Image (tube, grey):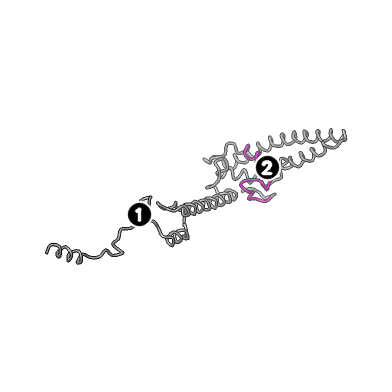
Amino acid sequence: MVFGRDKAAATAAPQETEAERPVKVGGKGRPTPSRRESQARNKRPLIGAPPAPKGATRAERKAARQARNAVAREERVKARQAMADGDDRYLPARDKGPARRFARDYIDSRRNLGEYFLPIALFSLLLGVVNVPALRLFSLVLLYGFVLVIAVDSYLLRRRVQRAVDAKFEGRNVPGVAGSGTYGMMRALQFRRGRMPKPMVARGQKPS
């Protein structure tokens, strides 16, 4: 009778269903995702380039890293364009403020001798390699003479820019007024197309 009762109890015990079976846990303490689940997660758009989820696969971590790099690259391009356009939010401290903007416009509205230094220096260098003593002497005179002219012009330009900035912002608590003359002088030594921020006024246009 005892053996019969045990056999009946074993027969009456509910069979373990598929849904009640414990999920197989991988070596990292998480359920092993199926191949379909992994592919679906890899195709999911990474809006805002979030970090890879906890327990992500190598492919997911690589995709998240590539997305973050793409977002960072896009942000750098936007910041550089905004800086080139003179947006104060993206400018370094030396370029910020209305005083520095006025100094830039003052320089960009005129032609400056410093812009022509590199072409003159290149022309002088080419003359110096010619095996003609008179041309070599002329190249040296040209180069050093132009350097002297630029030095004098830069000194006078620095004073003019500083006076113009002081007159425009007199009595106003505007940062960047001090040193605007030197700031403008250094900008005048650069090619117009290579200046950052980009020129916002045309040549001959009166700065506002």
With 168 as the anchor, is 138 left or right in this view? right
When the figure is inspected, residue 2 is found, relative to residue 106, above or below; the finding is below
Q: Looking at the image, which is closer to me, 77 or 204?
A: 77
- The residue mark sitting in front, 1 or 2, is 1
Q: Residue type at mark 2?
A: Gln
Q: Which mark is residue 190?
A: 2
* Mark 1 vs 2, N-terminal side: 1
Percent of width and height locating residue 172: 53, 41
Give whichever of 70, 103 is nearer the camera.
Answer: 70
Q: Quadrant of residue 137?
A: top right
Q: Residue at x 30, y 58 (%)?
A: 22
Q: Is residue 108 found left or right of 17 in the rendered image?
A: right
Disc 1: CA contacts within 10 A as few (<14), some (14-19) or many (>=20): few
| Residue at 69 percent of width and 46 percent of height | 110
Residue 20 locus on image (x, y percent)? 28, 62
Foreground residue, 10 or 200? 10
Check disc 2 and report its element: helix, strand or loop: loop
- Where are the magenta residues, as a range? 182-202
Measured as percent of width and height from the top left, residue 95 is found at 57, 43
Could you tell me the amino acid type at mark 1?
Val
Q: Which residue is mark 1?
A: 25
